[in-house]
Image: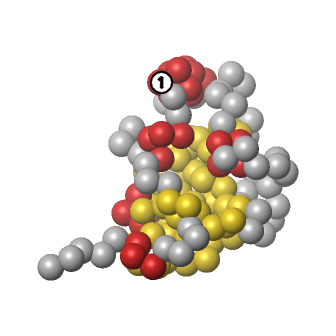
Amino acid sequence: MRTTNHLLVLTLDEQRYALPLSAVERVVRAVAVTPLPQAPEIVLGVVNVHGQLVPVVNLRKWFHLPQRDIELSDRFIIARTRRQPVIVIADAVAGVQESDTQDDVILIHDLETCFSLDEEQALQAALPST
């Protein structure tokens, strides 16, 4: 019996990407991001999610896409790594699909790979103690 993996499909500049649905907590509208001095370049800042400061990951920087400001129509995908929750910014969320029907979707297998060890340590140092 084959197991089917479900993916959350998102877009950045008309390109489709996907995260494993098992890593996604929820999708919400974009809100203002508080800058986080001395955070890694890939982190735009933090958002307070139910009393916890969650880093906002800039996938545009990771994929070397043109940078732009966050727009009201953008979506925040709240996802979980082994260490902590993170927010991924998407231009739009296309929905959920099965992994065996990927077509031209770029799969982000593991959000852990967004951060190098140095970036992870810098992020932890930049986050205020709670």
Q: Quadrant of residue 101?
A: bottom left
Instruction: For the N terminus, give its image quadrant.
Output: bottom left
Residue 40, compared with residue 112, is above or below; it is: above
Kindly give the residue lying farthest to the front in the view shown.
Answer: 103
As rendered, which of 125 and 59 lies closer to the eye? 59
Please provide percent x and percent y for residue 16: 63, 67
Residue shown at 41% from the left, 72% from the top = 99
The percent position of residue 42, horizontal first and vertical second, equals 66, 36
Asked if residue 45 shows in the view, the reply is: yes
What residue is shown at x 80% (from left), y 55% (from top)? 70
Classify 48 as above or below 37.
Answer: below
Q: Nearer the viewer, residue 66 or 121?
A: 66
**From the viewer's perspective, is residue 89 above or below residue 54?**
below
Q: In this orientation, which residue lies closer to the viewer: 70 or 102? A: 102
SS at mark 1 in the image: helix
Percent position (x, y) of residue 61? 71, 42
Query: Residue at left 53%, top 47%?
Result: 86
Visible residue check, residue 10: no
Q: Is residue 37 left or right of residue 72?
A: left
Q: Is residue 50 above or below residue 9?
A: above
Residue appearing at x 39%, y 38% in the figure: 83
Q: Which residue is mark 1?
A: 117
Colour scheme of the picture = secondary structure
Q: How many marks?
A: 1
Q: Quadrant of residue 92?
A: bottom right
Residue 95 drawn at (x, y percent): 55, 78
**Amino acid beneath label 1:** Leu
Q: Residues within 10 Å of mark 1 (few under 14, many from 20)?
A: few
Residue reaching furthest to the left? 1
